Image (spheres, rainbow, N blue to C red):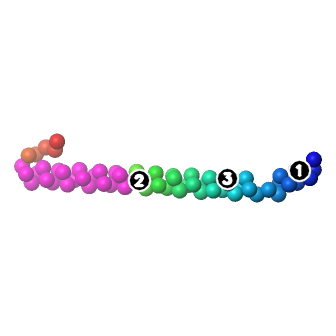
Amino acid sequence: MLTRLHQLLLDEEGATALEYGLIAALIAAVIVGAVTTLGKNVSSTFDSIANKMSAASGAGTTP
């Protein structure tokens, strides 16, 4: 019984899998944050372009 408990404490396979899982979760969180920020910037850029094109054509409103 003590031998099995000692082996369990020395086994690092589960810890390695957990570390990989945490790294994957961190990478996913960074990607979500970057895409959200980039999406907002792209949206505001397209809105600005649409407004300038609308003003240049004399329409005054965007569709």
Q: Earlier in the sequence, mark 3 or mark 2?
A: 3
Residue 13 image offset from top left, x and y in percent: 74, 56
Q: Which residue is mark 2?
A: 35
- Label 1 to label 3, Cα distance in Å? 21 Å
Main SS, magenta residues:
helix
Q: Which residue is mark 1?
A: 4
User: Which quadrant would the C terminus be assigned to in this image?
Assistant: top left
- Badge 2: few (under 14), some or many (20 or more) residues near its Cα, within 10 Å? few
SS at badge 2: helix
- Badge 1: few (under 14), some or many (20 or more) residues near its Cα, within 10 Å? few
Q: Which residue is mark 3?
A: 18
Question: What label does residue 61 carry, if any?
Answer: none
The residue depicted at 28 percent of the width and 52 percent of the height is 44
Q: Earlier in the sequence, mark 1 or mark 3?
A: 1
The residue depicted at 69 percent of the width and 57 percent of the height is 16
Residue 36 image offset from top left, x and y in percent: 40, 51
Residue type (three-letter) at the residue carrying disc 2: Val
Part of the protein shown in magenta: 37-58
Residue type (three-letter) at the residue carrying disc 1: Arg
- Label 3 to label 2, Cα distance in Å? 26 Å
Kindly report which numbered mark, 3 or 2, lies closer to the viewer in this rendering. Answer: 3
